[in-house]
Amino acid sequence: DQQVKQNSPSLSVQEGRISILNCDYTNSMFDYFLWYKKYPAEGPTFLISISSIKDKNEDGRFTVFLNKSAKHLSLHIVPSQPGDSAVYFCAASVIQGAQKLVFGQGTRLTINP
Amino acid sequence: GAVVSQHPSWVICKSGTSVKIECRSLDFQATTMFWYRQFPKQSLMLMATSNEGSKATYEQGVEKDKFLINHASLTLSTLTVTSAHPEDSSFYICSARDPRATLYEQYFGPGTRLTVT
């Protein structure tokens, strides 16, 4: 039972353009969502998060959008840079309680020069 | 952000032996730490929640007698893989939440690559 899904295993974007990574979830109890960036053989690095009381959160080049009715969130990176090439995981959590993170399968983003 | 370290970064052991992996929060105290496992080209799967001073909470399907977790202090949690077998070979990652932070993000260690021969 995959509660958090990233349906695109890979994405290729031209440098300078916008990268859009998508994530869907099924559990309506999730109220906090996070995006992590991961390089091979390293731990994930926190990028940005959003609470379910918001529909948008922005931090520099990164913006996360949340559509609760559609149970969908997306990460926008603009402008995309070569250093952004990595695997991106979205994760969901319930703030009250154990705060366990449920991860999607990841999307490998490649930024082409 | 907060810093979490893991040791060792990689380990090779023989089948049937036990391996201990340490997870430390370096600049904050963590009452709760989390242990994840990642197989190649797959997602991170939560194995257990490590609670300081009490027993760990294991996810369904994770053998508590095989993956021993000890959270003896507010800055250290250990995962011991007992009687390791080749199928236990994986990338093990711990995380912790900084209680001082206003957000709820978890900070991850760099991971430990375990290879069982």
Image: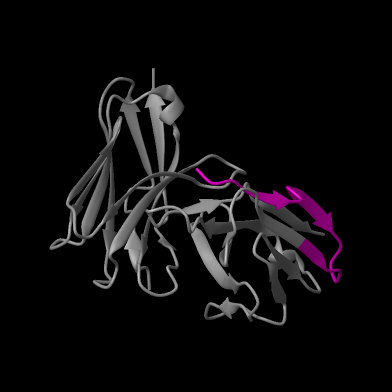
User: With respect to residue A72, does B63 lie above or below?
Assistant: below
Magenta stretch: includes residue A40: no
User: Which residue extends farthest front?
Assistant: B100
User: Which residue extends farthest top?
Assistant: A113
Query: Which part of the image, by quadrant, shows the N terminus of chain A?
Result: bottom left
- How far from the left and from the top, in percent, is residue A63? 26, 39
Residue B44 visible here: yes
User: With respect to residue A16, does B74 lie above or below?
Assistant: below
- Residue at 51%, 59% (x, y): give it: B44
- How far from the left and from the top, in percent, is residue B50? 60, 71
Magenta stretch: includes residue B17: yes
User: With respect to residue B56, does A106 lie above or below?
Assistant: above
Left or right, residue A73 beside residue A103: left
User: With respect to residue B50, does B21 lie above or below?
Assistant: above
Left or right, residue A50 beside residue B107: left
- Residue at 33%, 21% (x, y): give it: A15
- How far from the left and from the top, in percent, is residue B112? 69, 52
- How far from the left and from the top, in percent, is residue B47? 57, 70
Q: Specify the segment rendered in magenta.
A: B1-20
Quadrant hosting residue B20: bottom right
Left or right, residue B79 beside residue A45: right
- Residue at 34%, 37% (x, y): give it: A11
Query: Which part of the image, by quadrant, shows the C terminus of chain A?
Result: top left
Q: Foreground residue, B100 or B25?
A: B100
Quadrant hosting residue B54: bottom right
Q: Foreground residue, B40 or A51?
A: A51
